[in-house]
Image (spheres, grey):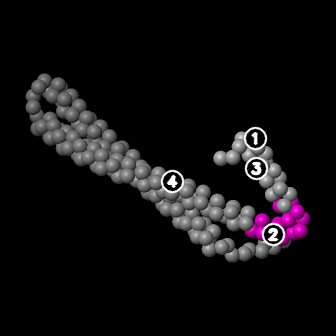
Amino acid sequence: MQEKTTALPENVQATIDHHETAKQAFIDSYDKYKATLARLDKHRKTAQAAHNQAQQTGQQWRDLIRQTDGALTKEITTLRRKETEDNDLAEEFDKVVLEVESIALVSEREAYDAWRTHGEAFHNAVETYDAYLLEKATRVLFALPEAKIIARAMNKRADLIIDETKNLYGRD
């Protein structure tokens, strides 16, 4: 069986297109956020490795100074200098982590905003499409003579309910 596709009205197609655009914007924004989180994790690990290296170097010269009974050798001086350099490097990586954390917070907010926009666009597209289908189905249904009889009966019933409500509670 072949399906017959008909063009949607302009307003329905526009809301569906807006939803697709908002959906893609959310996907892009979320991907950017995930990539920023991956960068942040990488920089945190690098900073931690730099701190660990500085601690190891510091422990090495402290162990050597104990082994040499307090004598300051060239190797100890070199290790102390290397520890200072490693600490400086670790501090720079900590600064990079802080910078990327602020980028991640902005990226997270952008992803959240895009998610909300996508949700609203989806809701609007569904409502608009449902209203279009209801209108189309109503037109087809009320073209039948039997439907006109049902509509009149429902209309009379609604009038009766309104009259009963007015009798019970009075008029506003």
Q: Residues within 10 Å of mark 3 (few under 14, many from 20)?
A: few
First reached walking from the N terminus: tag 3 or tag 4: 4
Q: Residues within 10 Å of mark 4 (few under 14, many from 20)?
A: some
Residue 68's place in the image compared with 147, above or below, is above
Evaluate if marks 1 and 3 touch, with contact meaning CB atoms under 8 Å apart: no
Measured in 3D between alpha carbons, the distance from the residue under mark 3 to the one under mark 4, in whole angstroms, is 40 Å
Q: Residues within 10 Å of mark 2 (few under 14, many from 20)?
A: few
Q: Position of residue 130 (x, y in %)?
A: 69, 61
Residue 1 appearing in the image:
yes
Q: Please give the residue where the numbered disc 2 appears in the rendered image.
A: 140
Evaluate if marks 1 and 2 touch, with contact meaning CB atoms under 8 Å apart: no
First reached walking from the N terminus: tag 2 or tag 4: 4
Q: Position of residue 114 (x, y in %)?
A: 48, 56
User: Three-letter amino acid code at disc 3?
Assistant: Ile
Q: Is residue 139 magenta?
A: yes
User: Three-letter amino acid code at disc 2?
Assistant: Val
Measured in 3D between alpha carbons, the distance from the residue under mark 2 to the one under mark 3, in whole angstroms, is 28 Å
Q: Please give the residue where the numbered disc 4 appears in the rendered image.
A: 116
Q: Please give the residue where the numbered disc 3 appears in the rendered image.
A: 162
Quadrant of the image occupied by residue 141 = bottom right
First reached walking from the N terminus: tag 1 or tag 4: 4
Q: Helix or strand or loop: what does disc 2 sit on?
A: helix
